[in-house]
Amino acid sequence: MSKGILERLDEGVVLGDGGYLLELERRGYVQAGPFVPEASITYPEALAELHREFVGAGVDVLQTLTFYASEDKLATVGLEGRVDDMNRAATRIARSVADEAERDVLVAGNLSVTWAYDPDDSTSHGRVREMFDRQLAVMTEEGIDFVIAETFSWVGEALIAAEAIRAVGLPAMVTMAPDNDPNSFDGYSPGEQVKRLADAGVDIVGANCLRSPEYMLPIMEEMRAAIPDSVHMATQPVAFHGTHEKPNFVSLPEFPYELERLTLPRAPMGEFALRARDLGYDFIGSCCGSVAVHVREMARALGKISADEREWRTKTGRAQSGYELHRMGNV
Ligand SMILES: [Zn+2]
């Protein structure tokens, strides 16, 4: 019997996966703009392949591609009525890739910001809860190990997700997305955000998306200092540059059609994984823009996979290139 997420976190750092939607858009399977996860039913093999790449990179957890898989969001691209199909397909795909892995890989059902939450309209709270309940009903039927609810701007909405997860009896990870102004839309500082979530009984709390490692780290420090060490903490930054004025990559003019200019190389993601571990974060993953090469670097830094895939030697001690071979032949 495999160990659950909380047991694994008690033993050490758990490595999360990377980003899905923007990478599937880059590969031609998702439309930029609406960014809904229809790939789970339109290109299931493309989604399975991306999951496999993350498993190959050393992750301990795969998330279902159910980000934005709610009726309101799908209606914006004419996919209303397919919400259950999409949640079911995405969970099946993640589950089957996890089950074919040679080591234990957990599947996290993913919930996200609904954009249906209005703090001043209590009927919207019930609707948001229904959306989460509906997604969770399908995902738990198909088999998930725990739930990651992420990318929240309102603590109020994140708390509704936490209640919905508690109702299905699974461990909960709930994270906030720190915008250019890292205070939540309902006015809580990063420290207050995680304190409220932890007080509500959420097992794993923290931050994900929008910010690069560089601009996520100060938020993480503030969050860590606000709650007891016994609470597990999660971080999943993006692999895109931000700027000092605009740390949120989505607010930069390069989003979404020139993101290639903002893409981080692999090394900062590996360095980030170590900084996060040293800060006391035990669920360390990544989000938008982070692909297998970034995740593998994190896995190596954390000792999840060996540093060298196979032994190789060159006369120069440097990585080979055609240029180098040519030059070496002429000296
Ligand atoms: Zn993201």
Image: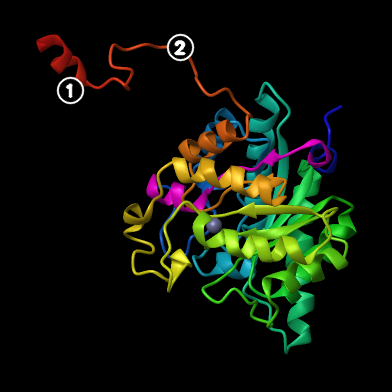
Q: Residue furthest left?
A: 330
Label 2 sits on a secondary structure element that is loop
Q: Are marks 1 and 2 in contact (CB under 8 Å)?
A: no
Ligand 1's quadrant is bottom right
Say if residue 130 shows up in the picture. no
| x, y percent for residue 239 | 47, 51
Q: Which of the 4 image quarters holds residue 189?
A: bottom right
For label 1, the crowd category at 10 Å Cα-Cα, with few meaning under 14, some 14 to 19 and many 20 or more, is few
| x, y percent for residue 209 | 56, 59
Q: Which of the 4 image quarters holds residue 162?
A: bottom right
Please give the name of the residue rendered at 67% of the width and 45% of the height, measured from the top-left corner: 277
Left or right of 244? Residue 284 is: right
321 vs 5, nearest the viewer:
321
Which residue was labeled with disc 1? 323
For label 2, the crowd category at 10 Å Cα-Cα, with few meaning under 14, some 14 to 19 and many 20 or more, is few
Mark sitting on residue 311 = 2
Mark sitting on residue 229 = none
Left or right of 94? Residue 238 is: left
Q: Is residue 113 above or below residue 3?
A: below
Q: Is residue 163 above or below residue 122?
A: above
Label 1 sits on a secondary structure element that is helix
Q: Residue furthest bottom?
A: 120
49 vs 203, nearest the viewer:
203
| Structural distance between the alpha carbons of marks 1 and 2 | 21 Å
Please give the name of the residue rendered at 33% of the width and 17% of the height, measured from the top-left corner: 317
- Quadrant of the image containing the N terminus: top right
Q: Amino acid at mark 1?
A: Tyr
Query: Which stretch did the figure color magenta?
Result: 9-27
Left or right of 9? Residue 91 is: left
Q: Amino acid at mark 2?
A: Glu
In this rendering, the count of numbered labels is 2
Please give the name of the residue rendered at 70% of the width and 53% of the height, measured from the top-left corner: 234
